[in-house]
Amino acid sequence: MKINACICLRALWHAAFIGVIGAASLPPAMATEPPDMTNAKPSDQNDPFPITVTVEPSLVVVYEGAGGKAGRKVTVNGRTLAMGPGGIEPVKIRFDSADPPLHSETDAAVEKDGSYSNTEFAAIEPGEYTITATAPDGRGTASATLTVVSAKGLGEKAAHTLMQAMKNVDTAMDAVERKLQDQPDSPARRETGKRIASYRAASKAFVEADPVASIHGFFGAIYTRDALLEKAGPGLQKIAGDSERLEQASKKIARMTQQLDGMDLACAQLAFVGEVAKTGAFILGLGAKILSEGGELAKQAWSWNRDQAADIASNAAKKAGGDAAGLATGYFVSNFEKLAKLQENLKGTLANLVVYATDKLFAAYCQQFAGPVDGVFHAEFTRNVNGKPTVWWKQDYKLTGRAILQYPNNAKGKHLLLSGRIEGYAHSFKTWETGLKAFDDKGIMSGTIVAKVHYPPRDLVGAYGARLMSQDIAGVTSPQPWGSGVGLTIPNSFLMGVRGELTDDKLSLLIGERIKDFIARDDVVAVIVSPLNTLGPTVTWYPLPFVDAHSVFAGAAADKPIDLKLTTTGKTMTATGTVDNSVNTKSAHGEYHLTFRLCNPGC
């Protein structure tokens, strides 16, 4: 039986929500499109259950053991709704591969919070595997990919990933040098150039050591030794995991390089230089870790093979592309140690650049206001029930973050223009609702029994964690202009642009573009027992989305600048202020509260 009340929720909720958003638009000069409401509607029981799936690790190393293929188990996990048409039902997990041919299926029990996990699958042959998870309703699906490689294949992948990462870091340093040329000559600019030159020299020394030949030779050699591969299994998997992380970091710095090239604001460029260098140093540290792990495996191989040099230098080993004799002579041990030291030295050159760029270089040209920002949002949605306005849904949450606004040292005049961003986390989500009965205009729900289970947004940081994270991502000594790479990967994080005007007695802010925002919702599963349904209980679900952070800041501003009072104590300027606003429409009520405390040089 279809519950018509659920269908009514779609249009009516949409209208109520748009009422709040429409009343809280941005300043005309900086207006953006309202949030996409396509998926922000309660849905009926014909919509598939939501479900997510991940596979860990996503890159697995396998090897040929005595008598067949040795396996490596992986964990498949995710989140869905812990209920199906027949009650508590499992998630179906399917494994598919064209080469090698594979089609298998297993179950994963769903916990009360909607999480599920399964570790039964053992990847046994190299190839690409598609893992599909089907929700308890039998219709919602999600998929992930598992890559399985041999030890030799891992060597090829690790070598390629390392050299591509090095190339991306070099390209990033090219962009940094171009941006430095846009700045007036100064001791700080010249010193930064010297530190980049030190990086170039260290990079050249590393490439000349030919790391690709060493990696290919070592992995190609151990690929021919079943017993050694079995011993090296844990070490190989470590290298596989670090290679995956290195690949992701390499892609990140490539994106950052594009951002840096596209920036036309001098202070934003300079602030970003430190963040680019920091990411480069992280990449080089991962590379050194991979090489050190290769050295540990080489020590194992040397210990095991030192008395078997003639046997290891076989034709089979040569065909595998590896210098097998090097296992017995200890060549790879010393060579990996040399490469790791070169990579650590390379990392050190960028670490020195990070410290200097975030401390001396930025200060030579720019200043900034930085400090905490906090927000509280409350909304109520109403409709007429039996002729009376009735609240059917409430939502509350908090925002914790930090703002940074920058301006050049040489700026002059009584009205100085600033630019920057606000970044942080949403947390402490709360929902109350009576959705089904509030929209039951025809009395369909009369005599029914409704049991509900709420699946709120995951709050991984909480109020205390959000404060710690927001302090870390925007410290005074690390003026990152477009957000913390680590912080923005955390669920419920947000990032938006902001512009400012500084006068003698105030700092005025205008909320800018939405750069990154969170999507959070409370999923409600309802089990309905009705005397009108002779087929048994009906299971339905509907998502109740939360207003995003950008809309909260825009709603609090209400088409006006946010004015902060400016005071000066010694060498520190402090801008403080509180913003309160409320919006009322026919079917919704919203309350906004923001507090700011920004300091130059920082607080």
Image (cartoon, grey):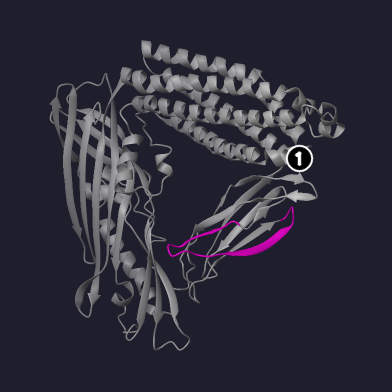
* 157 versus 545 height, above or below: above
The quarter holding residue 270 reads: top left
Residue at (41%, 76%) from the top-left corner?
527
Q: Amino acid at mark 1?
A: Ala
Residue 490, x across and y down, in percent: 41, 45
Residue at (32%, 44%) from the top-left corner?
466
Which residues are the magenta region? Answer: 98-119
The N terminus: image quadrant: bottom left
Residue at (28%, 26%) from the top-left corner?
407
Residue 269 visible in the current orientation: yes
Circle 1: element type: helix
The quarter holding residue 239 reads: top right
Assess whether residue 201 is covered by the magenta stretch.
no
Disc 1: CA contacts within 10 A as few (<14), some (14-19) or many (>=20): some
Left or right, residue 154 beside residue 137 = right
Residue 338, x across and y down, in percent: 63, 20
Residue 422 visible in the current orientation: no
Left or right, residue 108 beside residue 512 = right
Which residue matches tag 1? 227
* 590 versus 282 height, above or below: below
